Image (spheres, rainbow, N blue to C red):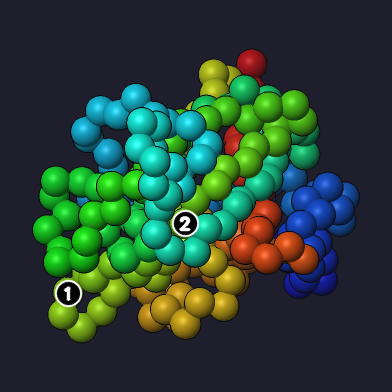
Amino acid sequence: MSHNSRRHFIKNLAAGTLAGAFAGTAQAQTLLTPREMEGPYYPITPQKDQDADLTRVAGKSGVAQGTHIEIAGQVFDHEGNTVEDVTLDLWQANAFGKYHHPHDTSDAPVDEHFQAWAIIQSGKQGRFRFKTVFPGAYPLNAASQRTPHIHLKASKLGYDSLLTQLYFPDHPLNQKDGLFMRKSAQEQALMTVRRTERENHYLYNLILQKIPL
């Protein structure tokens, strides 16, 4: 992709207009959401409540601590077509940077009112939406932390499964995060949610590779 085409794509992407990004250049059709490692804390404890509102847990009256946010978006294939019925499996740390996972032995508190894990599907025109808390940074060691992020797996028959992480714009830890900084500026843009005019509301679009028949 040429320098001008890349600037056009990222400009449209930052504005949340993925259709415009695809229209900017035919070569943009080859761009896919970058892959990322799963990390050590994929949920292993069964839970019945896996709906799109992670700020509440079924059967409990309280709400999750921290800043509540909403993330909405669409799933596209590499040709710009929307994709319905994609399974989105997502998990993250709570507002204190603690995963609801037995292997997370940090001193940060567990929030029993935070759902921590959801499995949802993209609907009409590939749209999805979920409510959660802004994830806290979690410690890698005494000297460093991982920047706030959300893990996501996307899968549907006929498409390459995707494992990725969502990042947040302009967070000061982004520039210190090894995984984030290994990505190019274009890849970082594809993995970073975008603010909207609504407070604590973000947009995020996924681009999957369709498997040729």
Tell me which amino acid carries mark 2: Val
The amino acid at mark 1 is: Asn
Does the residue at mark 1 contact the one at mark 2 (Cβ under 8 Å)?
no
Q: Secondary structure at mark 2?
A: strand
Please name the residue shown 36% across and 31% down the image: 59
Q: Nearer the viewer, residue 126 or 182?
A: 126
Which of the labelled discs sits on residue 141, or is there none? 1
- Residue 135 location, quadrant: bottom left
Residue sitting at x 26%, y 59%: 98
Q: Residues within 10 Å of mark 2 (few under 14, many from 20)?
A: many
Dot 1 lies on which element? Answer: loop
Which residue corresponds to mark 2? 133
* Front position among marks 1 and 2: 2
Q: Which numbered marker is on residue 95?
A: none
At a point 25% along the width and 79% down the height, the residue shown is 144
Q: Tell me residue 192's x, y (percent).
A: 58, 62
Q: Is residue 83 above or below residue 213?
A: below
Say which label, 1 or 2, has the lower sequence index: 2
Residue 3, placed above or below residue 193: below
Q: Residue 118 falls in which quadrant of the image?
A: top left
Report crowding for label 1: few under 14, some 14 to 19, many 20 or more residues within 10 A (C-alpha).
few
Q: Seen in the image, is 35 located left or right of residue 45? A: right
Q: Quadrant of the N terminus?
A: bottom right
The residue positioned 63% from the left and 30% from the top of the image is: 122
- Could you say where residue 169 lies in the image, as x and y percent from the top left? 58, 71
The answer to which of 77 and 108 lies nearer the viewer is: 108
Q: In this rendered view, identify the residue nearer to me: 71 or 155.
A: 71
